[in-house]
Amino acid sequence: MANPPLKLDAALQEKILTVTRCGLTVDESTGFFRTALGLCYLASLMTKETLDFQALDKEFNRFIYHSIGPGHSITSILQFMSGSKVVKVLDSPRFVRAMASYCTDIPVESIPFLLGLNLGVAKDLSKIDVRGPVADWIEKQRLLREEGGL
Protein backbone atom coordinates (compact mmCIF):
# COMPACT_ATOMS: atom_id res chain seq x y z
CA MET A 1 0.00 0.00 0.00
CA ALA A 2 1.34 3.45 -0.90
CA ASN A 3 2.13 5.96 1.81
CA PRO A 4 -0.53 8.62 2.35
CA PRO A 5 0.38 12.08 1.06
CA LEU A 6 2.49 14.17 3.42
CA LYS A 7 0.41 16.79 5.25
CA LEU A 8 1.68 19.84 7.11
CA ASP A 9 -0.01 18.85 10.35
CA ALA A 10 1.15 19.74 13.88
CA ALA A 11 3.40 16.66 14.04
CA LEU A 12 5.22 17.52 10.80
CA GLN A 13 5.55 21.15 11.87
CA GLU A 14 7.20 20.02 15.10
CA LYS A 15 9.58 17.75 13.16
CA ILE A 16 10.61 20.68 10.94
CA LEU A 17 11.16 22.88 13.99
CA THR A 18 13.23 20.13 15.64
CA VAL A 19 15.48 19.99 12.56
CA THR A 20 15.68 23.81 12.71
CA ARG A 21 16.88 23.69 16.32
CA CYS A 22 19.80 21.49 15.26
CA GLY A 23 21.43 24.52 13.65
CA LEU A 24 24.12 26.17 15.77
CA THR A 25 23.66 29.75 14.56
CA VAL A 26 20.69 31.82 13.43
CA ASP A 27 21.83 31.62 9.80
CA GLU A 28 22.39 27.87 9.99
CA SER A 29 19.04 27.30 11.73
CA THR A 30 17.25 29.40 9.11
CA GLY A 31 18.93 27.37 6.36
CA PHE A 32 17.91 24.14 8.09
CA PHE A 33 14.32 25.42 8.38
CA ARG A 34 14.12 26.51 4.76
CA THR A 35 15.58 23.26 3.47
CA ALA A 36 13.53 20.94 5.70
CA LEU A 37 10.33 22.84 4.94
CA GLY A 38 11.07 22.98 1.22
CA LEU A 39 11.69 19.23 1.13
CA CYS A 40 8.44 18.62 3.02
CA TYR A 41 6.56 20.84 0.58
CA LEU A 42 8.03 19.03 -2.42
CA ALA A 43 7.30 15.64 -0.82
CA SER A 44 3.68 16.72 -0.27
CA LEU A 45 3.36 17.13 -4.05
CA MET A 46 4.10 13.42 -4.53
CA THR A 47 0.50 12.25 -4.64
CA LYS A 48 -2.06 11.14 -7.16
CA GLU A 49 -4.62 13.30 -5.41
CA THR A 50 -5.63 16.58 -6.99
CA LEU A 51 -3.89 19.37 -5.11
CA ASP A 52 -5.32 22.77 -4.27
CA PHE A 53 -2.09 24.74 -4.61
CA GLN A 54 -3.65 27.94 -3.32
CA ALA A 55 -4.72 26.22 -0.08
CA LEU A 56 -1.46 24.30 0.17
CA ASP A 57 0.66 27.42 -0.28
CA LYS A 58 -1.50 29.33 2.21
CA GLU A 59 -1.01 26.59 4.81
CA PHE A 60 2.77 26.55 4.31
CA ASN A 61 3.00 30.36 4.22
CA ARG A 62 1.10 30.60 7.53
CA PHE A 63 3.54 28.17 9.15
CA ILE A 64 6.53 30.03 7.69
CA TYR A 65 5.22 33.37 9.00
CA HIS A 66 4.63 31.98 12.50
CA SER A 67 8.02 30.25 12.53
CA ILE A 68 10.50 32.74 11.06
CA GLY A 69 8.44 35.88 10.60
CA PRO A 70 7.48 38.08 7.68
CA GLY A 71 9.45 38.37 4.47
CA HIS A 72 9.50 34.66 3.69
CA SER A 73 7.12 32.52 1.67
CA ILE A 74 7.00 29.07 0.14
CA THR A 75 8.02 30.72 -3.13
CA SER A 76 11.13 32.28 -1.59
CA ILE A 77 11.98 28.99 0.12
CA LEU A 78 11.76 27.09 -3.18
CA GLN A 79 13.95 29.76 -4.78
CA PHE A 80 16.45 29.28 -1.93
CA MET A 81 16.42 25.56 -2.70
CA SER A 82 17.40 26.31 -6.29
CA GLY A 83 20.44 28.36 -5.29
CA SER A 84 23.94 27.81 -4.02
CA LYS A 85 23.13 28.42 -0.32
CA VAL A 86 21.14 25.19 -0.07
CA VAL A 87 24.23 23.16 -0.99
CA LYS A 88 25.94 24.27 2.23
CA VAL A 89 22.94 22.96 4.19
CA LEU A 90 22.82 19.70 2.24
CA ASP A 91 26.54 19.13 2.83
CA SER A 92 26.09 19.59 6.59
CA PRO A 93 26.32 16.22 8.36
CA ARG A 94 24.30 17.74 11.21
CA PHE A 95 21.43 18.60 8.84
CA VAL A 96 21.49 15.17 7.20
CA ARG A 97 21.45 13.45 10.62
CA ALA A 98 18.61 15.70 11.80
CA MET A 99 16.52 14.95 8.70
CA ALA A 100 17.16 11.22 9.03
CA SER A 101 16.28 11.28 12.73
CA TYR A 102 13.32 13.65 12.85
CA CYS A 103 11.78 13.89 9.36
CA THR A 104 11.53 10.18 8.70
CA ASP A 105 8.64 10.77 6.27
CA ILE A 106 11.28 12.00 3.82
CA PRO A 107 14.02 9.42 3.25
CA VAL A 108 17.39 11.13 2.96
CA GLU A 109 17.93 9.16 -0.27
CA SER A 110 14.97 11.03 -1.83
CA ILE A 111 16.52 14.49 -1.34
CA PRO A 112 18.30 14.56 -4.74
CA PHE A 113 15.06 13.56 -6.49
CA LEU A 114 13.06 16.27 -4.67
CA LEU A 115 15.69 18.90 -5.51
CA GLY A 116 15.62 17.78 -9.14
CA LEU A 117 11.85 18.16 -9.12
CA ASN A 118 12.23 21.69 -7.77
CA LEU A 119 14.79 22.57 -10.44
CA GLY A 120 12.53 21.14 -13.14
CA VAL A 121 9.61 23.25 -11.99
CA ALA A 122 11.84 26.34 -11.77
CA LYS A 123 13.03 25.72 -15.31
CA ASP A 124 9.49 25.23 -16.63
CA LEU A 125 8.01 28.25 -14.83
CA SER A 126 10.74 30.83 -15.18
CA LYS A 127 12.75 29.41 -18.08
CA ILE A 128 15.92 29.82 -16.02
CA ASP A 129 19.06 27.84 -16.66
CA VAL A 130 19.14 25.24 -13.91
CA ARG A 131 22.79 24.35 -14.33
CA GLY A 132 24.79 25.33 -11.29
CA PRO A 133 25.60 24.29 -7.73
CA VAL A 134 22.35 22.43 -7.01
CA ALA A 135 22.44 20.49 -10.28
CA ASP A 136 26.12 19.72 -9.60
CA TRP A 137 25.23 18.49 -6.09
CA ILE A 138 22.48 16.24 -7.48
CA GLU A 139 24.92 14.79 -10.03
CA LYS A 140 27.53 14.22 -7.32
CA GLN A 141 24.95 12.29 -5.28
CA ARG A 142 24.07 10.17 -8.31
CA LEU A 143 27.73 9.30 -8.86
CA LEU A 144 28.24 8.46 -5.20
CA ARG A 145 25.15 6.21 -5.27
CA GLU A 146 26.41 4.43 -8.39
CA GLU A 147 29.79 3.89 -6.78
CA GLY A 148 28.07 2.45 -3.71
CA GLY A 149 29.14 5.39 -1.57
CA LEU A 150 25.56 6.28 -0.56
Image: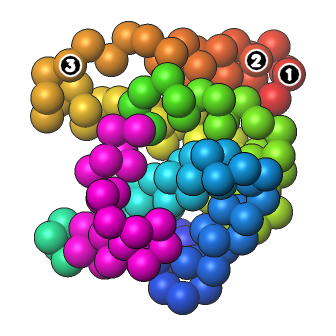
Determine the CA span between mark 2 and mark 3: 27 Å
Identify which residue is drawn at 25% across, 32% down.
Answer: 122
In the rendered image, the vertical position of residue 124 relative to residue 32, given as above or below: above
Residue 91 as seen in the image, left or right of residue 50? right
Identify the amino acid type marked 2: Leu
Q: Are marks 2 and 1 in contact (CB under 8 Å)?
A: yes
Image spot of residue 46 (x, y percent): 40, 58
- Nearer the viewer's eye, disc 2 or disc 3? 3
Report x, y in % for residue 85. 53, 30
- The earlier-in-sequence mark between 2 and 1 is 2
- Label 1: which secondary element: loop
SS at mark 3 in the image: loop
Which label number is shown at residue 128? 3
Dot 2 crowding, Cα within 10 Å, few <14, some 14–19, many 20+: few
Q: Give the amino acid at mark 3.
A: Ile
Q: Give the alpha-carbon distance from disc 3 to disc 1, as whole Å.
A: 31 Å
Mark seen at residue 80: none
Q: In front of the other: label 3 or label 1?
A: 3
Find disc 2 in the rendering and name its residue: 144
**In which quadrant is the C terminus drawn?**
top right
Image location (x, y in percent) of residue 65: 37, 72
Along the line of sight, the residue nearer the viewer: 130 or 142:
130
Q: Magenta stretch: give its range.
A: 57-80
Task: Please name the residue shown 67% across and 46% down the image.
Answer: 28
Is 8 a magenta residue?
Answer: no
**Residue shown at 54% from the left, 88% from the top:** 10
